[in-house]
Every structure is written in C-alpha cells, then in structure tokens.
Image: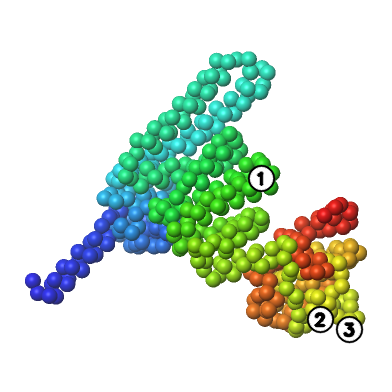
Amino acid sequence: MNFKNFLLTLSLIISFQAYSQTITGTFSDLANQQIKLVGFNGFITYTIDSVRANEKGNFNLKYSKNDYGMGYLMAENGKTFIIILADNETIELEGESLDFPESIVILNGKQNLLFEQYATEHPRREQTLSAWDYLAKIYEKDSLFTVHEIPKQTIENEKQRIKEEDSVFLACLPNDSYVSWYLPIRKLVSSVSVIAQYRTDEIPSTIAAFRTMDYTDYRLYKSGLLGDVIDSHFWLIENSGHSLDSAYIEMNKSIDNLIEKLLADEQKLNEITEYLFKLLEKRSLFTSSEYLALKVLNEANCTINNDLAAQMENYRVMKIGNTAPDIAFNGDIFAPNYETDNIPQSLSDIKSKYTVVIFGASWCPACPSELRQIAEIYNKWKSQNIEVVFISLDEDKDVLKNFTGIFPFISVCNYKKWESPAVKNYHVFATPSIYLLDNKREILLRPNSIKQLDSWVEWYLVEGNSY
C-alpha cells in the first residue's frame, strides 16, 4: 500500500470511528426537507448532523461518542422529536412527520423503546396518583366518608402499587444504559409542580434528591436537563409553603452544597454559578443571589471569569452596611429644585437625611416606569428629608433632556454609559439599580423596585416604626 492510499484508509477509519452511530428515518411528509440532529452541551445546544431527506422522506443521520446523551430531530418548521443518542445502538424511526408524534414508531433502538414506553406510561400513573390523592383527602376530611376505613386503606394500597410499579420499571433498566440514569432525573424534574401543590409531604425528600445530584456529571451536561434541574430545585424551595426567610435559609444550604460539588471542576463552576446567579436575580431572590456572590468570591479554591466576577463584586462592595462611594457630578446636571449657584456638585454635597441613588437610562425597559413612580411620590419623599439622584447611562444629550425634563429630582449624566466612573465604582451591571443611603452614605437598602422602597418609607418614616 502506498503512502497516499494509507492516508486515505486512515482517514476513512477515523471518520468511521468519529461517527459510529446512525439514525435512520422515513417520514413521508418530510420529503426533500432538511433534517437536523441536535445535541445538548450544558445550557446550550449544537448541531450534530444535518441532511436533506430524499423524495420518499428517507434520511440518515450520524453521531459520535462525544454526542452520547439526549438529542432531538428538528424539521424545517422547527418541530422536534426527542431521542436518546446511545452507544452501540442503531436507531430506526418511521412516521408521517414530526408534527404528529403519535404517528412515529421506533422500529429499532432498545433504549429509545424503553424511553418511549416510560414516557407513555409515567404520565398516566402520575395522573392516577393525583386522582387517588384527591379522593384520599375527601375520605380523611369529609365526615360523610371519614368513618369508612376500608375505602381509605384501598386507596392507600392502590397508590402504593402504582408507585412500586413505576419504581420497578426504573429498577429493571440496564444498569450501564443512559436511559437508566436519565429517566429518574426526568421524573424528579417533572414531579416538582405536582409535589408542591398536591404531595407536600414529599417536598423535603425531593429537595434532598436535588442536593445529592452530581452537578459535574457528564451525563447531566448531555441531557438537556441542566437548566431544568437548577430551576426546579430552587423553585421548589421558594414554593415550599414556608416563609421567604425560611426559604432563603434552605436556598443557601443548597448553594453551599452545589458549590462544594463544583469546586473540582472550574469550568462547570463558572457556568452553573452564572446561570444560578442570573436565575436568582431574575426571580428577585436577592438575599440568596448576594449569598451566592459572596460565597464564590470568598472561595479561595476557585477562579471566576471576569464578567461574572464583576457582576458579583457588586454584592461584596455594595452590600448593606457598607459606605457607598462618593459620586462627582461630572457632565450635565439637571436639578429643578435648586438655585443655579446651589446645585450639588457631588453626592456628598447633598444635605438630606436620606438619598436615593438610581442608575438607569431612557433605553432601559423598566426605567421609565420606575422613574415616573418616583416623580409622582417625590414630594412625599422630600417631606421625609429624602433626596433622589438619577445617574443616567444615556449617551445622547437631546434624548436625555427629553427623558429627564419632567423629573423634579436631580439627574446627572456624563454620556459615558457603562464606562462612567460612578457606574464602575458602584459595580452596576443592570438597570435600574437602586440604593438608599443615609447622610453618611451608609447603604441602608438595596430595593428591587420603587414600590418596595416606598413601602420602606411608609413603614419607617411616615408611620414612624422603629428601624
């Protein structure tokens, strides 16, 4: 064999090894359409293979060892069909189109057949369990039925039988198969809303199950469930029926548990921490997002990427009780309530007992509404010795003047947007960002809305409750 033929043979061997598994499909309605095979990698998806079906709707897609996990077929109209990309498994599918999953038949692929069976049977078991739970409550609380012990015991027996049937199915799955790992995780995630609403006695064990998961597990990253697992974990704690203070304690326990598991894998630590931080911020769970930020920033055994660290630094530098940096009012200052010769030139020039500092911009979706609310209640706040300073991130002077023209409070802008020294000193990464300071610039409150801040003003200042 000459060298050229040797290289060709080697190339074919490598190609064969790289794409060793196939998915064959026949879908009559997908004739001449482009079909994609999409895989999961953490929080993102990627295209594994893409082919055009022939005139009869036949297609053949390939995937490699690096793609093992969950994936889905996607037609040109965006319709999808979930499949397991398993080792040593040739998958054969037949149907009309991805629009009608009930028409799809799995002709070959053991793990996919097991997945399909469970996906069909498990929801029916869950629906039946919910019905039995409903009846059980009637027999426990309604005086017309509570005296009848035999029906109550029958209901409990049937509930137990259904649960055992589900458990036996999962226990009998091949130990080394992906489906044996995936289905229990999928079951855990899908059960959260039902447990929170109807089976509250299972909340502690469900939270414990989330905490025992290995968040560095490669299988989780290939499952498409990573975001769902984190969302469901913290949603269940938030909706467990306890006070928000109690929920924060449980969330922080879960954060401790999660970070401890992730310290061994810096890349996953960064990815999951950033996702969770944004999730907690989005849900206005600021006590736990602050806890997460400080936990990670103070962890000596890990390195956080610069963008995430900059966001989290806001909580370390600008936490309640700290002294906020002074702000020089460089650029344009609009102060309708001040004489020209008496306009403050910095935050420290303001002599009010309290100062509200709000970072925002005309282009910020929530800022116009929040700032209009301040304008409406500004006189009430002013009577309580509160001044307001709006630090604008706008870049256009005319836009700024039109935007701030109706505001009775101080507005300041140097047209440097995120590069403004004040923005950097306060580690602002989102708008609006609001701070309530005392006359020594100590941070008293970091409200997530003007409504929350006004409630503080009403309670502590207007009504005179102790602080």
Q: Secondary structure at mark 1?
A: helix
Q: Position of residue 249 (x, y in %)?
A: 63, 48
Q: Nearer the viewer, residue 432 or 353?
A: 353
Figure quadrant of the C terminus: bottom right
Rendering quarter of residue 360: bottom right
Q: Earlier in the sequence, mark 3 or mark 2?
A: 3
Q: Secondary structure at mark 2?
A: loop
On the picture, is 207 further left or further right than 69? Answer: right
The residue depicted at 68 percent of the width and 47 percent of the height is: 245
Q: Nearer the viewer, residue 331 or 101?
A: 331
* Residue at image mark 1: 246
What's the distance in space between the residues labelled 1 and 3, CA to CA? 51 Å
* Residue at image mark 3: 340
The residue depicted at 66 percent of the width and 17 percent of the height is: 144
* Residue at image mark 2: 345
Q: Position of residue 102 (x, y in %)?
A: 41, 43
How did the renderer colour the structure? rainbow
The residue depicted at 57 percent of the width and 62 percent of the height is: 298
Figure quadrant of the N terminus: bottom left
Q: Secondary structure at mark 3?
A: helix
